[in-house]
Image (cartoon, rainbow, N blue to C red):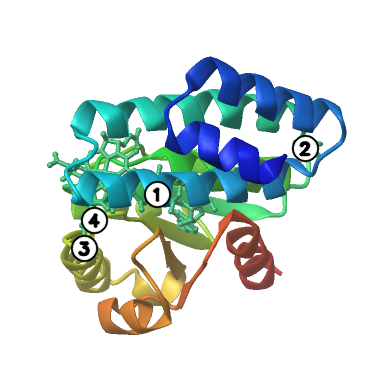
Amino acid sequence: MLDELVNLIADLKEKEAVEAAKKLLDDGADPIRVLERCRMATEIVGKRFEEDIYFIPDMLFSGEILEQISQLAKAKIHRDVDDESYAGKVVIGTVEGDLHDIGKNIVAFLLEANNFKTYDLGVDVSAQKFVDAIREVQPDVVGMSGLLTIAFGAMSNTISVIKQAGLRDKVRIMIGGAPTNEDVARRVGADAYAKDAQQGVELARQWSA
Ligand code: B1M
């Protein structure tokens, strides 16, 4: 059933994909696992885009399908929010020049669901905007998402600007997004890389303890 969902999304069959996801979730499938499999579908979409089988509107459409499924999955995730004693504070955003936000939104949601006070700066976030938010919010963790390889430069620049502002030792920085890995984290000057939303929450938990 999960494999069928992957194919329906990859083939851009919106109605059938959303219905299949709803059925899986209503039948008790783990919402995080469903989202992870949906991510596999977007990899197929990306490959078809590279092969000129799909074009930008198709990528956009796949994003819209995923967004609908994310909303269904989010409704199934138990939120353990306690306003009085949150687990920590996180500032998160997609770095400058990059407009991809589906993965970042899943991470932000899961952080909130795990009682982190989460300040989502959105997409195409400049280095200065990160610096301003760190000064204002004083977070434990700063999260930078990026799906384009050019995002590596923006991550590196943002971390340099945070350093110049004298704020680097006040926060732990994690990066994430499909093309990132441990090596990229090291090269851009981040503290760690999270391969998915769950790992992002685990890192934030370690760093906020
Ligand atoms: Co774009 N796109 N796109 N795109 N897009 C990719 C990324 C691409 C790999 C497709 C391809 O060619 N194979 C390619 C990048 C190539 C590269 O840089 N090497 C690409 C391109 C080229 C482009 C444009 C340049 C196309 C153009 O205009 N010519 C353009 C760029 C616009 C811009 O950003 N300036 C563009 C535009 C778009 C759309 C707007 C059409 C749409 C985005 C819609 C949106 O986000 N609202 C889109 C989409 C949908 C994709 C693909 C198909 C899917 C991305 C996605 O949402 N995945 C993508 C193909 C691919 O990824 N292979 C592609 C699902 C999501 C849940 O996964 O974001 O990885 P992900 O998030 C995961 C983890 O990575 C992790 O947790 C999430 C959940 O597990 N994670 C974090 C993410 N952020 C994290 C942060 C953390 C921790 C974990 O801590 C801070």
**Mark 4 Cα within 10 Å, few/some/many (few <14, many 20+)?**
some
Instruction: Give the percent coordinates (x, y) of residue 28.
Output: 87, 35
Q: CA distance from mark 3 to mark 2?
A: 35 Å
Asked if disc 4 and disc 3 are in contact, CB closer than 8 Å, the reply is yes
Q: Secondary structure at mark 4?
A: loop
Q: Is 147 above or below relative to 180?
A: above
Residue at 39% in and 31% down: 62
Closest to the observer: 142 or 16? 16
**Mark 3 Cα within 10 Å, few/some/many (few <14, many 20+)?**
few
Asked whether residue 136 appears in the rendered view, the answer is no
Disc with the residue nearer the chain's start (1 vs 4) = 1
Pointer 4: what residue? 148
Residue type beneath disc 2: Val
In the figure, is residue 20 to the left or right of 127? right
Pointer 1: what residue? 44
Disc with the residue nearer the chain's start (2 vs 1) = 1
Name the quarter where the N terminus is drawn.
top right
Name the quarter where the C terminus is drawn.
bottom right
Asked whether residue 80 appears in the rendered view, the answer is yes
- Select label 3 or label 1 by which is in front: 1
Instruction: Give the percent coordinates (x, y) of residue 65.
Output: 47, 26
Q: Residue furthest top?
A: 15
Residue at 31% in and 54% down: 147
Residue at 42% in and 27% down: 12
Pointer 2: what residue? 81
- Select label 4 or label 2 by which is in front: 4
